[in-house]
Amino acid sequence: MNKTSRLRERFVEARSHSEKICEPLEIEDYVPQPMVDVSPPKWHLGHTTWFFEAFVLEPYSKGYQLYHDDFAYLFNSYYNNAGERVLRPNRGLMSRPPVREVMAYRAYVTEQMLDFLDKNPDQEVWDVIEIGINHEQQHQELLVYDIKYILGNQPTFPVYGEGFSLSQEVKKGFVKVEGGVYAIGASGDGFCYDNELGQHEVLIRPFEIAENLVTNGEFLEFIEARGYQDFNYWLSEGWDYINKENITAPLYWHKHKGEWYSYTLEGFEMLDLSLPVQHISFYEAYAYAEWKGMRLPTEFEWEVAGDKLNWGQLWEWTYSAYLPYPGFEKAPGALGEYNGKFMSNQNVLRGASVATPKGHSRKTYRNFFHSSCRWLFSGFRLVK
Amino acid sequence: MNKTSRLRERFVEARSHSEKICEPLEIEDYVPQPMVDVSPPKWHLGHTTWFFEAFVLEPYSKGYQLYHDDFAYLFNSYYNNAGERVLRPNRGLMSRPPVREVMAYRAYVTEQMLDFLDKNPDQEVWDVIEIGINHEQQHQELLVYDIKYILGNQPTFPVYGEGFSLSQEVKKGFVKVEGGVYAIGASGDGFCYDNELGQHEVLIRPFEIAENLVTNGEFLEFIEARGYQDFNYWLSEGWDYINKENITAPLYWHKHKGEWYSYTLEGFEMLDLSLPVQHISFYEAYAYAEWKGMRLPTEFEWEVAGDKLNWGQLWEWTYSAYLPYPGFEKAPGALGEYNGKFMSNQNVLRGASVATPKGHSRKTYRNFFHSSCRWLFSGFRLVK
Amino acid sequence: MNKTSRLRERFVEARSHSEKICEPLEIEDYVPQPMVDVSPPKWHLGHTTWFFEAFVLEPYSKGYQLYHDDFAYLFNSYYNNAGERVLRPNRGLMSRPPVREVMAYRAYVTEQMLDFLDKNPDQEVWDVIEIGINHEQQHQELLVYDIKYILGNQPTFPVYGEGFSLSQEVKKGFVKVEGGVYAIGASGDGFCYDNELGQHEVLIRPFEIAENLVTNGEFLEFIEARGYQDFNYWLSEGWDYINKENITAPLYWHKHKGEWYSYTLEGFEMLDLSLPVQHISFYEAYAYAEWKGMRLPTEFEWEVAGDKLNWGQLWEWTYSAYLPYPGFEKAPGALGEYNGKFMSNQNVLRGASVATPKGHSRKTYRNFFHSSCRWLFSGFRLVK
Amino acid sequence: MNKTSRLRERFVEARSHSEKICEPLEIEDYVPQPMVDVSPPKWHLGHTTWFFEAFVLEPYSKGYQLYHDDFAYLFNSYYNNAGERVLRPNRGLMSRPPVREVMAYRAYVTEQMLDFLDKNPDQEVWDVIEIGINHEQQHQELLVYDIKYILGNQPTFPVYGEGFSLSQEVKKGFVKVEGGVYAIGASGDGFCYDNELGQHEVLIRPFEIAENLVTNGEFLEFIEARGYQDFNYWLSEGWDYINKENITAPLYWHKHKGEWYSYTLEGFEMLDLSLPVQHISFYEAYAYAEWKGMRLPTEFEWEVAGDKLNWGQLWEWTYSAYLPYPGFEKAPGALGEYNGKFMSNQNVLRGASVATPKGHSRKTYRNFFHSSCRWLFSGFRLVK
């Protein structure tokens, strides 16, 4: 199978996977936006479709008819270069277009794309489509986070279903990594984002890194040792954050009649102490590490040790700021807004999670979130 | 037909009317809460049902089985005496229960109520049911306001349909009313709320009151005379309000290519200058009156003149604070929270609107909203 | 002594009294603005001076030289007609001009005024001066409130000194007042504000009003009966207010080692149970009355009963909204902004307080504050 | 002169220098806090004194009598381990203790310290005193920032006086720096903070760095090219920040009748285009660099190039997050809160400014502020 057939196949797969994720939802679940970071599922479905319309069909497919004039306004996320848009906090107010029309929009654009691909477009277009597929995959992961947040904030804790549960980690020790000069970043074979490029040498000092993620049981010890009440373990911002937000446990943990439960996509369940701790902020990961007398890895240490680790259940907080690699260059045009403009005051996470679509993870991948975010599928491991 | 059969009939009518109002909606329209004052249609449907469950079936119908244990929590509005509840600003986050389950809840409670009514309950119960019907009628009016607000904030301005449009007013002069002592308030024949009771004498000075509501065309003159830009016409709070919120015209007015349009439930339309001006705050009504060198009526003047006026298209702002009548007494128990606790810093509106359900208006009715509210069906007339 | 000499004398007295109030202060105390309602003493001293400059000297005294071009900008309060001004919440940031220069400004304007008065200006000017004196007297009362708030928020609770303490009330019963038609408002002999004018007849029903203000001891019973924790006694807004602000006792009350203390201008002292309760909001007064099964008087009842009451220690909350009397007319020009534009969503207080300057109280005086204000010298009496 | 005499001398010098900085102030200038980042000068004077009392005299000087029991509460900044404290945003409300008492407090503690030093304390104590002196020097720099902010926000733009003006930079080219492995951080001879320690090797790629800071004239070109209006140059957070705060020029710049002026400590002056641009946020520095097609240096590049640069007029923003060096260890006890807990979401600045006290700068010094801060003495240079 040649490269373009593979891409075509991956395009079809990506389009249908987004819809599959939403299958267990009620129509009503597609609408709300319970916090600014969360987008309504309806919006994700529209936005990933608009991406192909705005960046592939409109510029490259001659005579392409927009599905609807207003949809660019409704489904643009943050591309300033792509015009006006609904303000992010207002996405949950858009009851229209209804879900069935968003689905019709998806079908129309998918079909138009397939027709267009049959015409063997230039390599330049294939590159944009590759980005569009990866973009949709990123939104698939966000869809899972957002669905969990929408359902997990219903007083009735509804069940979503299977497919995103964690499993117990097996390994238990620490791996030693030698100091030295290592190559960091993607070499550019295979797809990667601009923020991974500029493979460069980094000097690493010897370190030991945990083979396993910190578990619920281990994190519970921190809680019981009143770690959330002792500022000595916390970054100053983190201390302010947990006190302002009244945070005393990971997101989705509930204490009910003296026992710990957690909301999962499979429902409201007793906390399983053997699973990796999930839904914590960088601040909480940092505090736990301080309490243990250890620390979090840098993103470079993580990348160097990556092959020796068992990773992929949860994104792992590193103590690295999200900054450009040496020689970083933004893509030209609207796609240049993809990564570079977020390079301030965020933390890098490495790895992948059970919500990451197949084929969307690699050792050099640099995910990034604000230090306070907890609704993503995040965990951490220690370094000493 | 005897009194109880009439009440039974009115109960059935009230229950089905709420559902009829929602018929033109998409499922998605039942969910959002675009501002704190607005409740999702789904919530109104559940809340009016819960009222009968909590105040009639639970206390009076032996062996009544709650439809669902969580629904009291979900659908209580502000009755502190009736337990915990979802916080008002979070109503738009509840995608569950889905609409079909709310409808099933409605059907169940309506049926249980009818069975119960067959058992000829005491007068005390009929009194609560009377309040329950009036309560549902009040929410029917709010439903219309809220649906208009939800749809009117969609970038696509969808059409709802007919049934709530205004018509041109015919009369044009001022009516003279003699000074003297007048009886104000309800005498207690026929249903009325506690806040109308305590009929009492009030001394009124002679005044002249407009037979017609101020029109769009007249209000436009105020706009064109830059009335929104001259603080001399405004209450201090009103001036701060319009400047903070960037208000320069009534709600739902849009200037498009030099012409004025307004969003109505029948769609986005050219502004009809001959219709009464709608969706203005008390502050705007006050400023217009100042600009005209006239004033708004007090609620007592309105009630005295009522029979000579053509009213019922729009609720009319008065320059009266919502305060208790002499000798006002709250009902005992949770229903005592119905009216009295809101008697501070609100304005009385008198009359009724095209969204007021049949049988829910009378000359002594005291409606009340904060001076800044604009999403209700409000207008005003002048006094000189 | 003729009328103008008396006014001249009162002018001199008013000017020196403001300065006398500030005598016990440290220079540093003139600067802070611990909440928006409070103005720095320095600002009051400048603002009352600017009033004479802007409304008397500039318009009427030929060739008058402004003391400083910037002072109108610094010391205008809310007169939109008198130009731009420092925004209210920023008054506490103005360390300049220093106090000694504000005092020099005061001396200059006072002297210029006296020179000008020697020239026997027209009656129109005397009228404005009369307002200017009354205006300065109002600020003298605010000065006392604001000084108490500034000092009472110092962790060290500094002593201001004597002059504003309350005394025990003697009478203890209720006075009966007959129903009937009473004349309300000022007849216009002697100075009064525009908001008191339009003497008019009001129909009053018979009532009984307490001869004494509610005392600390009585209010403490409400606290101990957990009145602050039972929403049944509260207006809805009041309940939200005390919960948001964590209010569980009057302002300046402190519980220390199981005993109640209060901060007074004479220092931090054991609470004297026999004195009138002070520094409560309208909401708290309302809740206490509900708990007692009584109510607050209307402003009309208060005025009718006034001569039979012992009043003047504290401003007394009434359950009347601050609204225009029939036929109310604003003064022309900037002074028209004095009263009318505040007639929305405020409560009337009647009487006077120990901080009210001599000669600045009368039975028809209508003071007004928002229902939540507590830093003023407020108390209340009951009606049954 | 031996080490302890030198330290004693530096102690005396540091104590008197703080007071010297405040000499041109009016008493009123010591009080306000015009934004949360700014502390009143009075507070700085008390806080630096409290540091010696809390960390030297109390623990080490037998029988030491506190000057005042409340002062720890008033003058603790953020040392959670040192007990309760006045909340940061409320520092500007403390008119008491007055300045003369803060000065008396300073004199008392300075004298007690000198007596104590005469008793030849252990090395451990000298180490804390060394930190206390450096701490006071840091506050001296903040004092200058804060005084400028307090005075620069007076509508009258008062003159402070000389001592902190910038001079024209002479060099104009770019210096080439070879790639290679360089030692970064302090080796520990001489005083340094814990955040500089852990000298370690870093791999640097070749770069060229500007010998001069960007000037007002150069920055004005960016403004005139509408750089503040084009989101393509901005980090996403930066774009939100300047739009929310309406920022269109560096802090203290004012356009008056078509000409640019700036407020300086010597008064309101025409903008001198030849001087380095000052009072810009990291976001503005970043945007300027993007517009120029260049970038900001990392803190490592800066340190490597340091000896070849002319630095010391303004702190220079780097594109490095403030993170721990490898092997970073916090000091034990309350002093461990000095640096480590701020290591998240801040940018490193390198160099020094005209407000940095003599003896308080070195090439390895890591200053840090949030990306949005503008009131510090900040500038930047470019790298290509």
Image (tube, coloured by chain):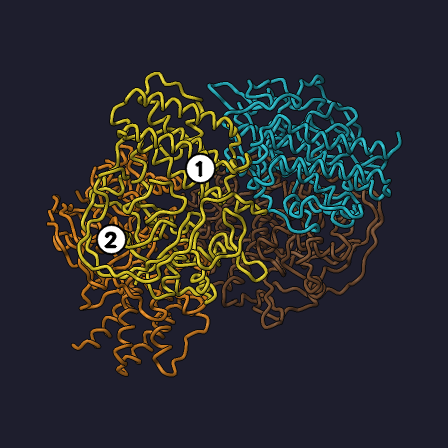
Chain colours: A cyan, B yellow, C orange, D brown
Q: What's the CA distance linking mark 1 and mark 2?
A: 37 Å
Badge 2 amino acid: Val
Q: Nearer the viewer, residue D168 or A350?
A: A350
**Residue C113: x, y in percent?**
31, 76
Q: Closest to the observer: C43 or D184?
A: C43
The label shown at residue A102 is none
Numbered circle sitting on residue B88: 1
Q: Residue at x 36, y 75 (%)?
A: C108
Residue A47 appears in the figure: yes
C299 sits to left or right of D208: left
Check if mark 1 and mark 2 are on a common chain.
yes
Q: Residue furthest front?
A: B1
- The reply, left or right, for residue D206 in relation to residue C343 is right
**What is the chain letter for disc 1?**
B
Mark 1 vs mark 2: which is more N-terminal? 1
Place of residue D97 in the rendered image (x, y in percent of width and height, measured from the top left): 41, 52
Q: Quadrant of the C terminus of chain A?
A: top right
| Amino acid type at image mark 1 | Arg
Q: Residue at x 32, y 21 (%)?
A: B118
Using a 10 Å C-alpha cutoff, classify the residue at mark 1 as few (fewer than 14 neighbours), some (14 to 19) or many (20 or more).
Answer: some
Q: Nearer the viewer, residue C29 or B248?
A: B248
- Residue drawn at x 79%, y 26% is A307
Q: Tell me the chain of label 2.
A: B
Viewer-proximal residue among D78 and B106: B106
Residue A138 on image: x %, y %:
70, 35
Residue A210 occupies which quadrant of the picture?
top right
Q: Nearer the viewer, mark 1 or mark 2?
A: 2
Location of residue C65 by image quarter: bottom left
Quadrant in the picture for the N terminus of chain A: top right
Q: Which residue is mark 2?
A: B304
Is residue D362 in sight in this rendering?
no
Circle 2: element type: helix
